[in-house]
Image (spheres, rainbow, N blue to C red):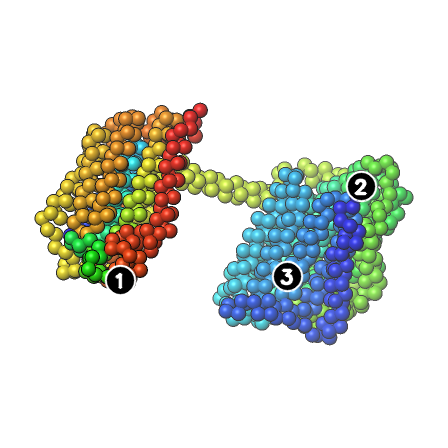
Amino acid sequence: MTDAVAPGWRHLPAVASALAFAGFVSLVPAVVAGGAPTLALPWVPALGVEAAFRLDGLGLAFALLVTGIGALILLYAASYFRTDRRLGSLLLTLSAFEIAMLGVVTADDLVTLFVFWEATTITSWLLVGFDHERGAARAAALQALVITAAGGLALLAGLLLMGMTAGSWRLSGLGALQTSTAYPLILGLVVVAAFAKSAQWPFHFWLPNAMAAPTPVSAYLHSATMVKAGVYLLARLAPNLGDTALWHGLLIPAGAITMLIGAVWALRQTDLKLMLAWTTLMGLGLMTLLLGVGTPAAITAAVGFLLVHALYKAGLFLAVGMIEKGAGSRNYTDLGALARAMPVTTVVVTLAAAAMAGLPPFLGFVAKELIYAATLGNLLLTLAVVVANALMVACAGMIALRPFAGPPRSPNPTPGDPVWGLRLGPVVLAVLGLGFGLLPMLAENWLIGPMHHSVAAAPLEGHLGLWHGLGLPLGLSVATWALGLGIYLNLNRLRDGLAAAEPRLPRTEAWYDALMAGLFGVARAITAATQTGRATSYLRVTFAVLAVMVWGALLTGPIAWPSLAQLRAATFIDWAITAIVLASIAIVLRSRSRLTAIAALGGVGSGIAFIFILYGATDVAMTQLFVEILVVVFLGLAMVRLPTAGDLPFRRLNALVAAALGIGATVAVLAVLGTPLDPVLSTFFEANSYPEAHGRNIVNVILVDFRGFDTLGEISVVVIAAVAAIAVLKRRVR
Amino acid sequence: MELLLAVLVGALVAAGAYLMMSGRTLPYLFGLTMISNAANLAIFATGRLTFGKPPLVPGDAETLAGAANPLPQALILTAIVIGFGLLVFALALALKSYRGLGTDDIDAAAAEERT
């Protein structure tokens, strides 16, 4: 087994990310003091677009999560895919994603925000589809791309509307938009964007499917960073758009539904990674719900839970990767009694699961108390949150106990903790969850307080702590644990009930599938209607479009009609030739004999040659006559080899299109004749043909001297046509 | 006379387009020829007409004035030859498709593909 990337280079992205993390840490004191470092570079000055970045409490906390967890994930990925030849591309894409995500959370300019937002969509598409040789991975990646990119379009429209309404392209300069007339539209667009990105109902289904991604990718994108971009957007815009009936009415129900769906279906999973994906939906729903409630206490709870969730969820995802590497499976029905063989993994999972269950003294407990305190006003919400949290307790129990206790089971006969590169990240994350719980003032002062300040525009009320006295929140916590224990003990019965109910429940993914099928159906129908493969219908469309364009130009522009004085009066011979040519055209159209038609076609050409002679174009006339003779000969030769055409049936539509085009051509020629002729080129040739090129036949001089290369090109075309014609005719038909 | 030429251009375009849409190879070739002629005639007419004075510099002069406009003539000469090349190639294709498909219906290839 050889390393895919040399050891020195393998950890370079992690080191770079750690350095960025250190850089952001150094900015913490300034932001805690209330500052907001900004950076603005001109980008498209003509449109007022800047590459503007601003780091307030919210942005800084996210930047720390993105770079800090990013460093751990990159380190982990380098070990996870150590011998995989795709490691280089994975590290590159992950790093690109990290930069994009950093851009999203620090952007202050609306267009900058959008560009980075789309960059996360595209890089995450590449990452979800990393195993691109598997059809399921490709399908999941495409689904995630379609949904989040559709949200991205909504975001673009929403951002532009906001910028136009507020008259500012800076997020920090938007001001309150709740009273503007465009507010409902803006909010709707922003909410669609945020819900699509953060996998809120009804868009939630893409997230579990995206578990087709490798474990490090899921740990990074689908727990700690990208799926939180939607929550970030809602938090970021809460001061500008929040606290209206519409805001509450959109966010609270969608958040609650997502939370409950995620919590319930997490129980149903036996694949630990899928279980984590569903619990992530629960967490995202809870954050959306809290932001929807929007009171200062709810915002404190939202940002507190955001930090807790990022730490324990990324840790758990990575730990599942450790289990998979160490024991050969991540399905808990295949696993048991791993505690002795994998002590590090056991400790990590236990710590992270305890934070997830909200046990003291973890930060998860602190956050859960905040959540209960924030939702106390509404009985229904309190109930929903208690049930969801109790389900989380049960899931935490499954994750922490099933693989490590019970009878020994493991596909790998000698399970063991994986190498240190895979241990470091999960350990750090799990310990942080414990550390912040023991010292909540650290989290409060550095992260939660400044984040709260950015969203609520007011300092934190009260303090974070493990002990808030005997109050309702504590009572609810106890109730949650009891309920969670009850669910855990009745797990099999509940899972059977869920399995029985599953086929009867409405699935929004089916709507998505139907929508995509409809889209492809419409595309197929349009293709079938327009791309018939029939040359005649293409010709008809081409001529019709040409006619519309000619008439469009004629009817919309001013036309100077030529006066009769500008035109030459027609002599008898002019009339006679015109009549002959028109008669010949009629014969070609109407004749039943192909020979007659070809002769009449020769008549048309000869008549035109005669016009050339009359009006001083002798060389042209000679060429025209020679060519006309050849045309008649060739067509006559071909006629012998082609079947008799018989009568051509009259086609009214074709006649209509042809007439429209023909009349348009006549009118266009007249319209050109009404404009003055610019003789500059003709005068030049008349003045210089003899002095410069020593030729008295000006037309010949133009062709062989002034425009000699054009003539060379023309001859080449004729040669190529002749060679091609010979090739076509010589090749035998199969 | 320009008026008559404009009418001729329109008649040639209309007849040429109609024949090209007829769906048979030989009429298609007739139509192609007519539309080539129409284009040449349109260039000629819009370059203005001068009766009976070819653009030839007389033997006792250096320059020329008052003769027919030489520029459209040069353009048309090129166009005639190119149009002829195009016609010959289309003719070869027509013969080839008849040999291959056994019909001179220009939509036959699509019909065959579908079955």
Q: Residues within 10 Å of mark 3 (few under 14, many from 20)?
A: many
Q: Residue at x 13, y 48 (%)?
A: A574
Give the Cα distance between marks 1 and 2: 82 Å
In this view, the mark in front (1 or 2): 1
Give the Cα distance between marks 3 and 2: 39 Å
Is A118 positioned to the left or the right of A604 in the image?
right
In this view, the mark in front (3 or 2): 2
| Image x and y of residue A600, in percent | 19, 36
Is A134 positioned to the left or the right of A708 in the image?
right
Quadrant including the C terminus of chain A:
top left
Specify the amino acid type for callout 2: Met
| Element on which disc 1 rests | helix
Q: Earlier in the sequence, mark 3 or mark 1?
A: 3
CB atoms at circles 1 and 2 under 8 Å apart?
no
Quadrant including the N terminus of chain A:
top right
Specify the amino acid type for callout 3: Val
Q: Earlier in the sequence, mark 1 or mark 2?
A: 2
In this view, the mark in front (3 or 1): 1
- Residue A187, which numbered label? none
Give the Cα distance between marks 3 and 1: 67 Å
Q: What chain is tagged by disc 1?
A: A
User: Where is mark 3, residue-wise?
Assistant: A104
User: Where is mark 1, residue-wise?
Assistant: A687
